[in-house]
Image: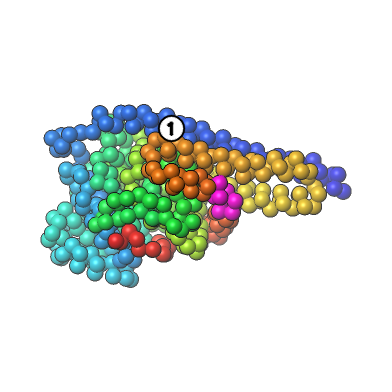
Amino acid sequence: MLDKWQPWIEITQLSFIGYFVALTAVYLVLNIISFVVIRQYMRRYDNQLLPMSFGPLLPPVSVIVPAYNEAIGIVSSIKSILQLEYPKYEIIVINDGSSDETMTKLIEAFDLQIYHEAYRNQLATQPIRQVYRSKKYPQLRAINKDNGGKADALNAGINASRNPLFCAVDADSILQRDSLDKIVHPFIDEPETIAVGGSIRVANGSTIRQGLLTKVSLPKSWLARLQIVEYLRAFLFGRMGWSPLNGMLIISGAFGVFRKQRVIECGGYQANTVGEDMELVIRLHQHMNKAKLPYRIAFIPDPVCWTEAPEDLNTLKNQRIRWQRGLMESLTTNIGLLLSPRGKAAGWIAYPFMLLFEGIGPIIEVLAYLLTAYFFFAGLVDLDFTLAFLLAAFGLGVFISIFSLILEELTFRTYQSKKELMWLIFTAVLENFGYRQLNSWWRLRGLFQFVRGRRHNWGAMKRVGRLGQ
């Protein structure tokens, strides 16, 4: 009986090996593309910095900060935005019905006063309770509204914004002073640009003073260290690789700039999804392709935004489950982009990759780990097959993680201490033995929740509070 099934068992095992080899190959190509593009970007950048006398030529930007129960870090985050080196920008903080002291902290820290102004309802949102303006900082306004979720809060900010570009920033983010100056460059260099994403880095362990990151250091938490390696591989070099192909499907909600009119044409952020940031980007691709309009969605590789990563398993689990649900909602809602005639790299390469490796990938990965262990201990596959799988699933994963660290060292060198670099290399190895498998399990749970149609929500993020220093 076993002889009958033996060929199918071997085909299954070969398929698992092929999956991990293909995933590694794609990430390797994306990493190489990223390295080439980043080196070109860095050689070019010094000559592209506009002197302050050209400040009036830079497009004005509206910085929109949605906040829900962010009392711990909201003041520090807004202080970092107020210190941006940019000639003309406004800040709009949206308190989305917080149940903590978020609004009270804002009023006290920035001397907010009730402000009467015309409010344009270009995008439907939950009712606005009150609009405030700071007496200390005229460019700062705050909107207090009924709870409607992050997408609804962002739409309220878009309605209140006065500038052609808006920058969406998470309330727990710390921006560098030149963040806006860097991220608007694609809009100047290529007028067809409709959206730009910025690089996100883990701030845990670093020193924050008065809203500014003054020293970059590794966190003591091993969970946060594991996320540093993960962010480098997937969020920096992964997304940077898609940018020159115009195939980037994700701009992190933590930091991204959009051309407001294009977003309004698309209907703004969708309140019925938990992954509103990715969903909007995919919908922008689809909208521009249907309209047969030239466009570009770009990525800036500089570490321009620092955010707090979860340091406890429960919070991280909830975050990853939520991300997976958001991914599947975004892909299925905009299925029309897949292999569309005008989809180009976004529809023919990036979308299939996201669907196979990120969307249904957790099913394949969890089955691969479980079935390989069963096949081996049941004597259904020999040692050579098992070793080949371990090399593909674990060895190649270690290779890509360390390769990403090498690229980081050759480009930005964010962590310059040799001791910290050695710890990161050790972390890159450690990540593939337990953490990556745990992530696959959490993502699988998120996929099941999506299939069951579980309702979305903001999701609770347990803050360590270090960004509020």
Q: Quadrant of residue 444?
A: bottom right
Type of the residue with mark 1: Phe
Front position in the image: 240 or 259: 240
Q: In percent of the image, x 30 and y 35: which residue is there? A: 186
What span is colored magenta in the figure? 429-437
Q: Which residue is mark 1?
A: 35
Say few, some or many: other residues with alpha carbon within 10 Å of mark 1 (under 14 / 14 to 19 / 20 or more): many
311 sits to left or right of 447:
left
| Residue 432 counted in the magenta span | yes
Whether residue 102 appears in this view of the structure is yes
322 sits to left or right of 64:
right
Q: In percent of the image, x 74 and y 53: which residue is there? A: 374
Residue 346 in picture, x, y percent from top left = 45, 36
Q: In percent of the image, x 27 and y 59: which residue is there? A: 76
Residue 158 in picture, x, y percent from top left = 27, 52
| Residue 286 counted in the magenta span | no
Front position in the image: 68 or 453: 68
Give the colour scheme of this rendering: rainbow
Say what secondary structure mark 1 lies in: helix
Q: Quadrant of the C terminus?
A: bottom left
Front position in the image: 199 or 271: 199
Whether residue 327 appears in this view of the structure is no
Residue 128 in picture, x, y percent from top left = 25, 64
Taken as a whole, is the magenta stretch helix, strand or loop?
helix
343 sits to left or right of 254:
right
Q: In percent of the image, x 38 and y 47: which residue is there? A: 200
Q: Quadrant of residue 383?
A: top right
- Against 357, is 69 above or below? below
